């Protein structure tokens, strides 16, 4: 079964489900492109927050407004600052039986590029898309995905629930609004949060493990394995 497939039912190892933008990277693609091209933001995000647009539709409209060369957009992608120790962290986790799964409401066009440039080969569940200087970043709903959501594209809750059916050790790492529901599905000691997610979990009285850099998540899980 290839890496794009649902994990095998025979898997007994740990599974780390992780957000990408702002979690595996220092900055969100959304924030960076809106800073570089403020005209694309429009009122799409406030309309999403008011329930007039889905999360996916808001991002699709914003990303579709980008007008720039691929070279310029790839410079923005590279400035997201992916975790510099990612390859070593994933390798160390794998050596201890942990699988890493990216679950993102963003676009796999930039996610896969950053992972490839970091020499990291892991499962990615994200919205498909491609970039055109005339049409911007054209993002599509992953309708064939087992984790499909009309609202988000990829429903992280479904990804985490699938992992929980396959392993007794499931961790989640995230930073934003779509990460709250999936984070609450895992045990507090394997619930890693930063930024908005950390503030929200604290606000509602839910325990979590704070982190700043993604490799801290890997180190915490490796330490857990050393101290059962």
Image (tube, rainbow, N blue to C red):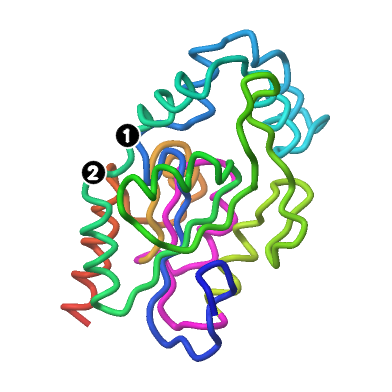
The quarter of the picture where residue 149 lies is bottom right
Q: CA distance from mark 1 to mark 2?
A: 8 Å
Task: Tell me the number on the disc at residue 200.
Answer: none
The C terminus appears in which quarter of the rendering? Answer: bottom left
Q: Secondary structure at mark 2?
A: loop
Residue 21 image position (x, y, % from top left): 46, 40
152 left or right of 196 in image: right
The residue most toward the right is: 52
* Closer to us: 224 or 81: 81
Could you tell me residue 30's position as x and y percent? 54, 28
Residue 86's place in the image compared with 37, above or below, is: below
Q: Are marks 1 and 2 in contact (CB under 8 Å)?
A: yes
Mark 1: few, some, or many residues within 10 Å (few <14, many ≥20)?
Answer: some
Q: Which residues are magenta?
A: 165-189
Residue that label 1 marks: 81
| Residue in the picture at 43% in, 46% down | 202
Q: Residue at coordinates 44% horizontally, 72% vertically from top-left?
A: 170
* Image quadrant where one finds the N terminus: bottom right
Is 187 contained in the magenta span? yes
Looking at the picture, does residue 32 appear above or below residue 201? above
Front-most of residues 89 and 188: 89
Quick one: label 2, few (<14), some, or many (20+) residues within 10 Å?
Answer: some
Q: Secondary structure at mark 1?
A: loop
Name the residue located 45 percent from the left edge and 43 percent from the top edge: 175
Q: Note whether 217 is above or below 158 in the view shown.
A: above
Residue at the spot of label 2: 84
Location of residue 194 in the rendering, given as x and y in whole percent from the top left corner: 38, 43
Q: State how many labels appear.
A: 2
């Amino acid at each position: 079964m290839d890496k794009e497939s649902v994990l095998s039912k025979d898997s007994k190892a740990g599974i780390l489900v992780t957000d990408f933008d702002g979690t595996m990277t220092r900055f969100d693609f959304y924030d960076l492109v809106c800073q570089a091209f403020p005209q694309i933001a429009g009122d799409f995000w406030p309309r999403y927050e008011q329930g007039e647009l889905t999360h996916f539709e808001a991002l699709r409209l914003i990303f579709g407004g980008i007008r720039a060369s691929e070279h310029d957009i790839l410079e923005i992608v590279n400035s997201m600052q992916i975790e510099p120790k990612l390859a070593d962290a994933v390798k160390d986790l794998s050596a201890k039986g942990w699988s890493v799964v990216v679950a993102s409401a963003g676009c796999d066009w930039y996610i896969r590029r950053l992972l490839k440039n970091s020499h990291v080969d892991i499962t990615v569940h994200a919205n498909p898309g491609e970039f055109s200087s005339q049409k911007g970043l054209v993002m599509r709903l992953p309708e064939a995905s087992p984790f499909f959501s009309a609202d988000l594209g990829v429903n992280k809750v479904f990804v985490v629930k699938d992992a929980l059916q396959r392993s007794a050790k499931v961790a989640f790492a995230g930073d934003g609004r779509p990460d709250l529901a999936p984070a609450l599905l895992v045990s507090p000691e394997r619930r890693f949060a930063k930024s908005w997610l950390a503030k929200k979990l604290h606000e509602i009285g839910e325990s979590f493990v704070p982190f700043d850099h993604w490799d801290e998540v890997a180190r915490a899980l490796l330490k857990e394995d050393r101290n059962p």
